[in-house]
Image (tube, grey):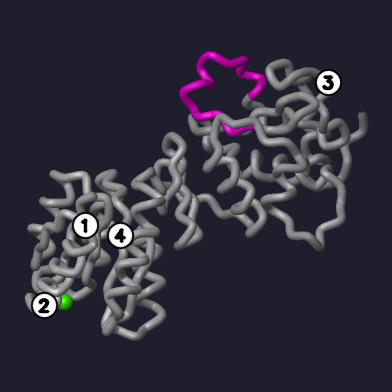
Amino acid sequence: MRLLVVEDDARLADQLRRGLRADGYAVDCSGTAEEARWLATENDYDAIVLDIGLPDGDGFTLCADLRGAGRWAPIVMLTARDAVSDRVRGLDVGADDYVLKPFSFTELSARIRALVRRGAHERPTIVRVGDLELDRARRTVRFAGRPIVLSVREFALLELFMRRADEVLTRSEIIEHIWDWAYDGTSNVVDWYVMNLRQRLHGVVDGPWIETIRGVGYVLRPAADRATADPAAADPAAVDPADPEGSAGTAGRARPRPRVARERAASGRLAAP
Ligand code: CA
């Protein structure tokens, strides 16, 4: 297991190097953001210990840059600043954990062990499906740079679809992830929210789209698949809220519906069969 320690305080860096080597890790040390960026790009570290204040930059930017470059080594940040906002910022730019200076080496060592166990799989702070981007920390959704305004529930629903793109989600799975235990409504509410979400994404003609899987649920398809699919499946009104199981046809065989029915559906009332 190989670690990178990014710390400009030479004495602390030396203590960390000796302690972590005694724990059995191979340890590289860097005192600047620039060198650390190069090392972390060239090597696959099992974990990175990252100080926030560096002479030529800061740990937040370095962390965000590494994640942006597709480097997913677990990162634990060291912060001397006892500000909650620093910890929040660190986690939101892609750090996995933090310790406050002065810290106990035993605790840092345990946190590193836990991070190394989890591995360096991808865990982006911004979820992307095609040109659709969802930033959970900033609570924004953009398609090809253009903002899309969503309600809290619509945002949660889109995030679930995007994190599990191309995976069919049942209505009960969706309810389980979006609503809490107190929710005792029916699964029809899912159909209603999916319909709203489709309308919000309606302007996104070349983007990902939500397909109905008859009798099962829904799946977010990336734009790339749309060319090979029946264009009717991309119809934002393809799911009739009065007929959520899609007896009018499968997802790829949506029945053309008159505009008035679409408008009534958009108002949230049930369309006449
Ligand atoms: Ca420092």
- Vertical arrangement, residue 19 with respect to residue 238, above or below: below
Mark 1 falls on what kind of element?
loop
Task: Give the residue at mark 4.
Answer: 75
Between disc 3 and disc 1, whose residue precedes?
Answer: 1
Mark 3 falls on what kind of element?
loop
Instruction: Tell us which disc is closer to us: 3 or 4.
Output: 4
Quarter, ligand 1: bottom left
How many angstroms separate mark 4 from mark 1 (CA)?
18 Å
Q: Residue at x 13, y 63 (%)?
A: 33
Q: Are marks 2 and 4 in contact (CB under 8 Å)?
A: no
In the image, residue 139 lies at what x, y percent? 50, 60
In the image, residue 29 lies at what x, y percent? 11, 62
How many angstroms separate mark 2 from mark 4 (CA)?
18 Å
Give the numbered dot on residue 24.
1
Between disc 4 and disc 1, whose residue precedes?
Answer: 1
Between disc 3 and disc 4, whose residue precedes?
Answer: 4
Q: Amino acid at mark 4?
A: Ile
Mark 2 falls on what kind of element?
loop
Q: Which residues are magenta?
A: 219-233
Task: Give the residue at mark 3.
Answer: 248
* Residue 12: in magenta span: no
In the image, residue 247 lies at what x, y percent? 85, 22
Q: Amino acid at mark 2?
A: Asp
Between disc 2 and disc 1, whose residue precedes?
Answer: 2
Between disc 2 and disc 4, whose residue precedes?
Answer: 2
